[in-house]
Image (spheres, rainbow, N blue to C red):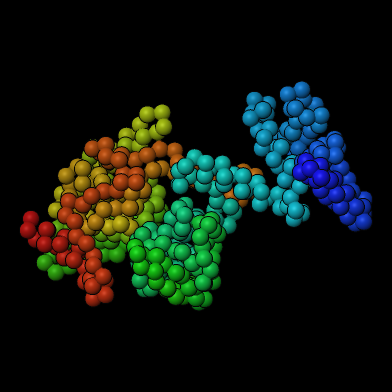
Amino acid sequence: MSNKVLRTVLIVLAALLLLTSGFLGGAVTASILPANPIRDALGLTPACPTQTNPITVVPSEQSGSDCGAYVSASTPAELQKLFDPFWESWQLLHENYVDQPLDDVTLMRGAISGMLAATGDKHTSYMNPEEYKQANTSMEGEYEGIGAWVDITGEYVEIISPMKGSPAEAAGLRAKDVVIAVNGQDMTGVAGDLVLQQILGPAGETVNLTIRRGDEVIDVAITRAKITVPVVDYEMLDGDIAYVALHTFNEQATPQLRAALDELLSQNPKGLIFDLRDNGGGYLVTAIEVVSEFIPNGVVMYEEYGDGTRDVYEAQPGGRATQIPLVVLVNQGTASASEITAGAIQDRGRGKLVGVVTYGKGSVQNWIPLESEESGVRITIARWLTPNEKQINEVGLTPDVIIEMTEADYEAGRDPQLEAAIQLLQGE
């Protein structure tokens, strides 16, 4: 028997086996047996699909099929042809996928996520209802978790910075730490939002994180707590040096910073240290308000859009600390609105930056709620440039004085960056 004849016999036997088992199990409809090589070998006509909302099958000479084309009544007419493959895939998935029924809401959310990810911009993404709620809650002031700003848009969840006084800080998490496992489960290939849901949880419960830090892999057990997002810490240091740390750029940042400056400046300090280390950013309007406390006038930032147009942001009048000698502390956890502030102070010659190169988050996202469900999308709409038109995104800011924090410094509780800032101000 030739190979060709043998192949034909095997195909027919396979087809008969499939058909027989189908009849033994009950009535078999044409839509359960879509077009495939076995049906082609038997000369069977491909079955037209059973219509499934929101799909409609309409006659079409261009479709190449007796069944017509797949369309959706909700798709705008001008996009109908463009979206034909999408709706066809949707229909075929419902007809042929082995595990039924499918969750249409999950498919819809996955489609949105895939569309936004196709931009190639890790900061443009979809937030399901739970993620959208968590994102807004953490900015507003309280939630339950480990207390860290994180980036969920990369291959793994990455720590931007631990929050001041949080379980994450107490456990020793640092900026650029990468979460590769949660409670012993490998997070390779798991979407960042799903990883985040496993990290968050009820206060009092422990979560075990496996962290990759450079070439080192460490396991960290962290007891979750009710997290109150910190805003401002301040004090007078020895030598009449004022110190104020801003931890986030939320709606409370500006009034609390102003109150801190009022109290500190009333003591006539010789200089001021503004600590933006491990500040993961926040609202743009808050960044403009904050930097205006230190810069009296002029451009503090450009916002550049895809068409090349720009919005120019200038300092608001009435800043409290526009004359006092100033040093700004930054590190790899200084991101977004923090980089706007530090970049403006550096470019305008208002003060020096001390620390290490910053995170490099210099793009603008609009968080837009979706009307049809309690979810939202983050869409990058522009990039930030410093007053000297330096790009921040993926580059970061290079300090005027680079001071690293060593492992020995962390273990001993030393802060050589703060010490260098004090020395600079005492020298001035």
Position in image of residue 176 (x %, y %): 36, 59
Q: Position of residue 80 (x, y in %)?
A: 67, 29
* Residue in the image at 74% along x and 27% along y: 63
Q: Which residue is more in the foreground, 341 or 294? A: 341
Left or right, 40 with reference to 141:
right
Eyeballing the image, is 115 above or below 219?
Answer: above
Tell me what residue is drawn at x 51 percent, y 72 percent. 184
Residue 264, horizontal then vertical, whole percent: 21, 61
Position of residue 280 relative to residue 237, above or below, is above
Measured from the top left, where is residue 108 in percent x and y? Answer: 65, 46
Left or right position of 402 against 287: left
Question: Which quarter of the rendered picture does the C terminus lie within?
Answer: bottom left
Residue occupying the point 71% across, 53% down: 103
Identity of the residue furthest to the left in this view: 427
Q: Is residue 405 left or right of residue 149?
A: left
* Visible residue check, residue 11: no
User: Looking at the rendering, which quadrant does residue 218 occupy?
Assistant: bottom left
Residue 389 visible (yes or no)? yes
State the residue in front, 31 or 236.
31
71 relative position to 200: left or right: right
Residue at the front extreme? 1
Which is more toward the observer, 374 or 6? 6
